Amino acid sequence: MTEAVIRATGIPFDKIDSDEEAIEAAKKYGMAFENEADWSRGKIIAEMFEDYCEDIPGFLDGPCFVCGHPLEVSPLAKKDPKDPRITRRFEAYINGWEISNAFSELNDPIDQYERFAEQQRQLDLGIDDEAHPMDTDFVNALEVGMPPTGGIGIGVDRLVMLLTDSATIRDVQLFPTMKPEGKGGIEIDFSKVKIEPLFEEEVDFDTFSKSDFRAVKIKACEEVPKSDKLLKFTLNDGSGEDRIILSGIKKYYDPAELVGKTAIAIVNLPPRKMMGEYSNGMLISAVNEYDGDEMLNLLLVDDRIPAGAKLY
């Protein structure tokens, strides 16, 4: 994994040993950190692999095996005896898709308890919502004894996509996720809603006014091949030319249900290359936590609002 990040970003992580050096190198490359104290060298490498390697066209077409995952993102895997910063784990990639995940199971109860404790700390502090919670029953089972064990999990859906030459996972699922019946949608229990704290730092009006928010009509929406996250939107922004924006909201929406809707976008951001195509702007979504999981709603407005209408 470290080698993949070095190839994609040019950052010499093989020569960087401290968390502080890794943070500075990542910041220079463009990564932003809310709290630098929550980040380590290994966590940065894993994050940069996800953000900068997985979406490069052809980079993981393989077939190839990505190995050497950092300890911070592999709480159940054994340490590599030659480098305790990484684990004995691999992921198989074909056609840019992660097909399988495998590792040597950690069977040291003391090491496992310490890793669970760190993961639970991150979970309690809200540092990492995907951290593994403490599992004392599992640790107790290890104390009784577990022989050397290895495991592999294969994504059958993606394997079938590969064998049938299907572009999206919905094409091979017997029961793909459907939107709720009725116009009312899902009833929300607001006692389970958690929002991010409001920013304390003020933004001056001149800086804010430079952001160009516009109403846009969704002319077309499709899944981006080889991406687990992205939808490609073709938008009418009132200029007479189509605007392409890529947005990582694939797991929340069926593309077909968004066509014809009116959304809000920032249209004067610099183009950003994603999956080999430039995204020209950003669609606005409302994000919050609901019952421990992330909830996202694309901001859709009245269809009577014309394309290109400016927000003030």
Image (cartoon, rainbow, N blue to C red):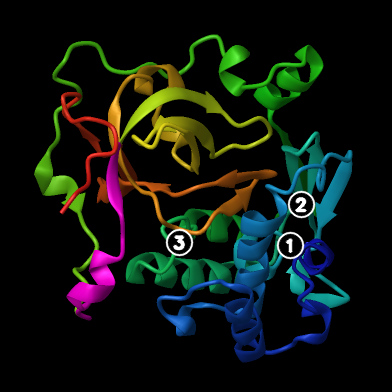
**Furthest-front residue in this view:** 240
Q: Are dots 2 and 1 in contact, CB under 8 Å?
A: yes
- Which x, y percent locates residue 94? 82, 35
The quarter holding residue 82 reads bottom right
- Give the magenta-colored segment's residue range: 201-215
Q: Which residue is mark 3?
A: 134
- In the depicted structure, whether residue 256 falls above or below residue 23: above
> Between residues 70 and 198, which one lies in front from this camera angle?
198
- In the depicted structure, whether residue 104 falls above or below residue 208: above
- Mark 3 lies on a secondary structure that is loop
Residue 286 visible in the picture: no
The residue lying at 61 percent from left, 86 percent from top is 24
Q: Is residue 80 magenta?
A: no
- Which x, y percent locates residue 229? 54, 39
Is label 1 or label 3 in front?
1
- Mark 2 lies on a secondary structure that is strand
- In the depicted structure, whether residue 300 falls above or below residue 167: below
Q: Amino acid at mark 2?
A: Phe
Name the N-terminal-most of marks 1 and 3: 1
> Between residues 65 and 85, which one lies in front from this camera angle?
65
Name the N-terminal-most of marks 3 and 2: 2
Is 66 situated left or right of 181 in this image? right
Q: Which mark is residue 103?
A: 2
Q: Which mark is residue 69?
A: 1
Is 282 situated left or right of 8 in this image? left
- Which x, y percent locates residue 207? 28, 74
